Structure formats: C-alpha cells, structure tokens
Amino acid sequence: MEARIRSHFEASIETKQRTLATMLPAILGAAQHMAAVLKAGNKVLACGNGGSAADAQHFAAELTGRYERERPGLAGIALTTDTSALTAIANDYSYEQVFSKQVQALVRPGDLLLGISTSGNSANVIRAIEAAHQGGASVIALTGKDGGRMAAMLKAGDFELRSASNVTARVQETHLVFLHCLCDLTDEILFPA
C-alpha cells in the first residue's frame, strides 16, 4: 500500500514537470489575458462536469473572495452552481445546453469563459465555448490527453492549458495547479505586493 501511495505522488510530480516544460508560456499568456479582462471590468465564467465542476466553483470562489492576498473581489461566476437553471435547461432542452444557455444569457463582448474538461470532449463545455465565441468572449480551455475537440475549436486570443497526461486523476491535479497559477498571477498583475 505504501508503494501505491508513493506511485501516486511520483506520477503527479512527473506529470506536473512534463506539463510545465510545455505550458509555461501559455499559462503566462492566459493569466495576462485574464487580468486584462478583469481590469477592463469584464467577468470570467467557468464551467465543467464532475470534478471539473468543483474546480470551476473553486476558481470562481478564489476570484470573488480572495486567493492569497487581500484585495477587492473579482468578477468570477461558476455556471455549475444554479441547480434550478441546470435542471430546467437539461429538462427543457438537453444536458448539452446546460452551460451554453447560461453563457448566451450572461456573456458580453470582452468577457472570458474558462472551460474545463479532462478529455477536451465534454459536449456541454464545447457548446459553451461556441456560445462564448458567438457572444464576443474569449476562452481559456483546461484540457488533458490530446486536447480533444476543445483544442481544435479555439481561436486567436484563446488559450489552451493542457495537462501532459492521459490519466484523469493526473489531469485534474494539474488543472488545479493551472487554476492557482491563474489566480496568483492575476493578483500579482492587478494588485502587486
């Protein structure tokens, strides 16, 4: 059992090292873009399924509350928290539209959508990205594996942060580091120590 525990830690460390080797410029660019969006008075919407839904909520909480330093709240909204909207949209339309209908209602030009999917193939996150683009918003996509369909649909001004793993647990662990980097760099850009 101790060897299993050790293997989880070692695999997580190795995944993060491989990801850092390829994603450093993209992380920096995404954070600079997110800071510019928030500085301009726009908002960040976040969505994902399962563990990625929890990550979207965690991320929005870090923006509206604080990350590690005291500062004014920033406009972050998780599209995963309104059970009435989620269930009504899923019931009246389809589960594939639970995020895109909210994006259509809430996004304004200059806003940012953070879409999280370990495979890059979550149909409802893909629909949300389409709606964000139609509404004039940019996208940061957190993916894993080969980036999936999400990677192929990004446009100029969008960013993909891809975990260098095919294992869902390792992808999720790396996504959390991405999110913490985005929060930390945004705070440093907007509210330098």
Image (cartoon, grey):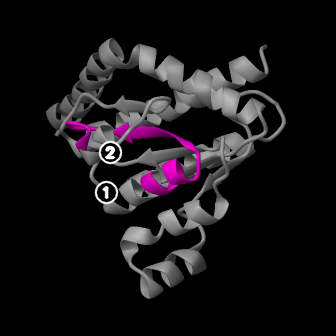
Q: Which residue is mark 2?
A: 150
Percent from the top left, x then y, of residue 73?
79, 41
Percent from the top left, x then y, of residue 186?
66, 25
Name the secondary structure under disc 1: loop
Q: Is residue 119 visible?
A: no
| Front in this rendered view, residue 70 or 118 | 118
Q: Residue at image x 31%, y 31%? A: 163
Q: Residue at image x 50%, y 29%? A: 157
Q: Magenta span covers which residues?
A: 130-148
Residue 144 quadrant: top left
Which residue lies most toward the bottom here?
92
Which residue lies most toward the right here?
72
Q: Is residue 175 magenta?
A: no
Q: For the residue marked with disc 1, what is the amino acid?
A: Ser
Horizontal placement of 6 versus 92: left or right?
Answer: left
| Front in this rendered view, residue 55 or 100 | 100
Quick one: quadrant of the C terminus?
top right
Reply above or below: 175 against 16.
Answer: below
Q: Which residue is mark 1?
A: 122
Q: Residue at image x 54%, y 31%? A: 180
Horizontal placement of 43 versus 100: left or right?
Answer: right
Q: Is residue 139 magenta?
A: yes
Q: For the residue marked with disc 2, what is the amino acid?
A: Met
> Are the two marked residues, 1 and 2, in contact with CB atoms closer than 8 angstroms?
yes
Q: Residue at image x 38%, y 78%? A: 94
